[in-house]
Image (spheres, helix red, strand yellow):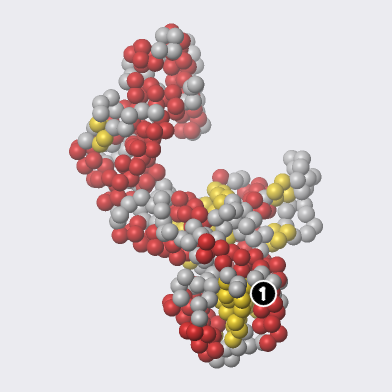
Amino acid sequence: MNEYRALVVDDEPDIRELLSITLARMDIECDTAGDIKQAEALLKSRQFDLCLTDMRLPDGDGIELVGHIARSYPSMPVAVITAHGNMEAAISALKSGAFDFVTKPVELQALRKLVSQALSLRSNPAVGGAGLIGESVAIERLRETVRKVARSQAPVYISGESGSGKELVARLIHEQSSRSGAEFVPVNCGAIPGELVESELFGHKKGSFTGAVADKQGLFMAADGGTLFLDEVAELPLQMQVKLLRAIQEKRVRPVGAEEEVSVDCRILAATHKDLADLVEKEQFRQDLYYRINVIELHVAPLRERRSDIPLLAEHFLSTKSREFGIPQPRLDDMAMQALNAYDFPGNVRQLENILERALTMCEQEAISESDLGLTRSGAATTQIDPPILAEEPSTQDQPTPQFADTAELQSYLDEVERSRIIQALEQTRWNKTKAAKILGISFRALRYRLQKLEIE
């Protein structure tokens, strides 16, 4: 007796026979129906692990059947068969709850891959947002949405402010999906120079341009079988958006300098902190690409809209950072917790993590005080540049004042100054950390943190 059973719904006997034979060779039992009425009768009479349905049926639209299965049999994945090039129908099916789609004429290799991914959901059930810390209504709703979209192959657009946790959500969708055994490949589209975007995404052949000294695999191929996360997708140049749209729709990419396209199978998750709909209105983002990546939209609420989660997040960050830096975990005193609860966190969860990481270095007692947090009375955070926490700075007499292009360059310079001074103090005390901390005028806890942070062995 076969382990799995599938339902095939199509009004063409030849298609039903082809699909039945293909599934039988995968050791999957198969029942067939020629219309929606027959399909619904079979669904009531026995349990199925998968449904494949045509979009055009004699007594209705296949999307109706998709919706019925999504409502009545939510644990059963359903895939649709669409006419080649009818992307609107495929997207409508995905929005209605379809797991995925294949196009006619059906490519058997693509069909087998789809069926395998759908059935793998049985052995990898979505547990719903484990890793999303909090008990607020917004987080509970997000967990439920992650659980649902993880069971689909549909593209997901994740919106939310910077630092709100969009990449974490993308990773959770991947980890709870049928693709969890393959790679999750994140890419910050805004961090790639415009002239290199195509090469980074699609790869290139040796000699295709100056500097192409060897063949290079693109990020699409790196994510083959898994998930490609396009963060800050709004930053893509318009001309690249056209090529991205084609790659997503055709599931094929052409490396720069190559003569032929290469098939690729990866799920697309996209995110940005910008308003994509507004950019479409301003013709700064292609409307057709927007509709293609925004099959399912998932919004991540800013931290100020879920303040009840701040204590749980604070406990999590203090616990993980203390273990990471090998120091005892301090608690937050009442005034510090009140200050955090009253703060608006324009940088969201990422900013909360940074604030608490800095507080660990400033705290010299068993509890973190309000002053350790570095928040002003107006609610604004102090500068994000980490100054050297030393009692004594190296002499700069007769030295030219260094110039810095940006804050990152300044921070790098300050880290080097601090690293040099700490090593000097350690050598002076024969690497006695307690004595070195006294010379530097900082706590032992702060020194241990800085040794870890500056990677001083």
**Residue drawn 52% across the image and 56% down it:** 174
Instruction: Sort mark 1 into few (<14), some (14-19) or many (20+) by Cα contacts within 10 Å.
Output: some
Q: Which percent across, then down, holds residue 166?
A: 45, 52
* Quadrant containing the N terminus in the rendered view: bottom right
Q: Is residue 256 left or right of residue 335?
A: right
Q: Which percent across, then down, holds residue 101?
A: 60, 72
Q: Which percent across, then down, holds residue 440?
A: 36, 15
Q: Is residue 346 in view?
A: yes
Question: What is the tally of numbered marks visible in this picture?
Answer: 1
Indicate whether 251 appears above or below 29: above
Which residue, given by chain and number where applicable, does mark 1 sit on?
24
Residue 108 location, quadrant: bottom right
The kind of residue on which mark 1 rests is Ala
Q: Is residue 182 left or right of residue 380?
A: right
**Residue drawn 37% across the image and 46% down it:** 349
The answer to which of 40 and 304 lies nearer the viewer is 40
**Residue drawn 41% across the image and 50% down it:** 131
Please tell me whether mark 1 sits on a helix, a strand or a loop.
helix
Q: Which percent across, then down, holds residue 127?
A: 43, 59
Instruction: Tell which residue pokes out farthest to the bottom in this image.
Output: 59
Q: Is residue 272 in view?
A: no
The answer to which of 79 and 155 lies nearer the viewer is 79
Indicate whether 279 appears above or below 435: below
Indicate whether 174 appears above or below 341: below
Residue 321 location, quadrant: top left
**Residue drawn 73% across the image and 52% down it:** 256
Instruction: Tell which residue pokes out farthest to the left in this image.
Output: 334
The answer to which of 221 and 373 lies nearer the viewer is 221
